Image: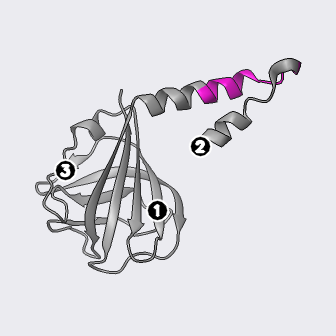
Amino acid sequence: MTLDELLALLPDNTTGEISAADLRTVVSDLYDAAHSVTQVYAYRWTTSAVPTAGHVTMDQPWMNFASKVIVSETTDDGVVLGFGLIDSAAAARVWFTHNATGAKLTADITGPSVDLGNYREVPISVREIVGNPPGNNDPVTLSLLVVAG
């Protein structure tokens, strides 16, 4: 939630209009923000089911019913992505942004990754898709928000 959305849950309390549920939402979001880490990585989109180094895809690319991100352990610029923080997170979210068009896909990470050698399968639940999918080998940004357990 944005700061404005959180503040909208807390109207002037002279009339006692702050509900317990709204207060719980505000406290939970503030806790998550204080215990979270955001990481950003450069990748290239692939239409192949198995990504090579520097590439990422999904089991159902750019679809609401996709259930896995399939990601190379090495980013496009040679960074080796560590999965320990993701795998032990209390909660995690992933965003893909198509660098050329700004199209975006947002998903919750629903469990630990599965190590398949040079790449990982990460279980997801898609939250939102805006815009058209990237083409094969298009640059994308993979952003991770991880809330520590």
x and y, in percent, of residue 98 in the image: 40, 71
Q: Residue at x 76, y 24 (%)?
A: 19
Report the residue marked by disc 2.
2
Residue 81's label in the rendered image is 3
Q: Residue at x 22, y 37 (%)?
A: 84
Q: Residue at x 17, y 55 (%)?
A: 73
Report the residue marked by disc 1.
105
Viewer-nearest of labels 2 and 1?
Answer: 2
- Left or right: 92 with respect to 24? left
> Which amino acid type is marked by label 1?
Leu
> Which amino acid type is marked by label 3?
Leu
Residue at the right extreme of this rendering:
15
Vertical arrangement, residue 76 with respect to residue 87, above or below:
below
| 11, 115: nearer the viewer | 11
Majority secondary structure of the magenta segment?
helix
- Left or right: 53 with respect to 5? left
x and y, in percent, of residue 43 in the image: 26, 65
Give the magenta part as a residue range: 15-26
> Which amino acid type is marked by label 2?
Thr
| 110, 133: nearer the viewer | 133
The answer for how far apart the CA atoms under marks 1 and 3 are is 20 Å
Residue 46's label in the rendered image is none
N-terminal label among 1 and 3: 3
Q: Are marks 2 and 1 in contact (CB under 8 Å)?
A: no
**For the residue carrying disc 3, how many other residues have a C-alpha within 10 Å: few (<14), some (14-19), or many (20+)?**
some
The answer for how far apart the CA atoms under marks 2 and 3 are is 28 Å
N-terminal label among 2 and 1: 2
Quarter placement of the N terminus: top right
**Total numbered badges shown on the rendered structure:** 3
Vertical arrangement, residue 82 with respect to residue 127, above or below:
above
Callout 2: SS? loop
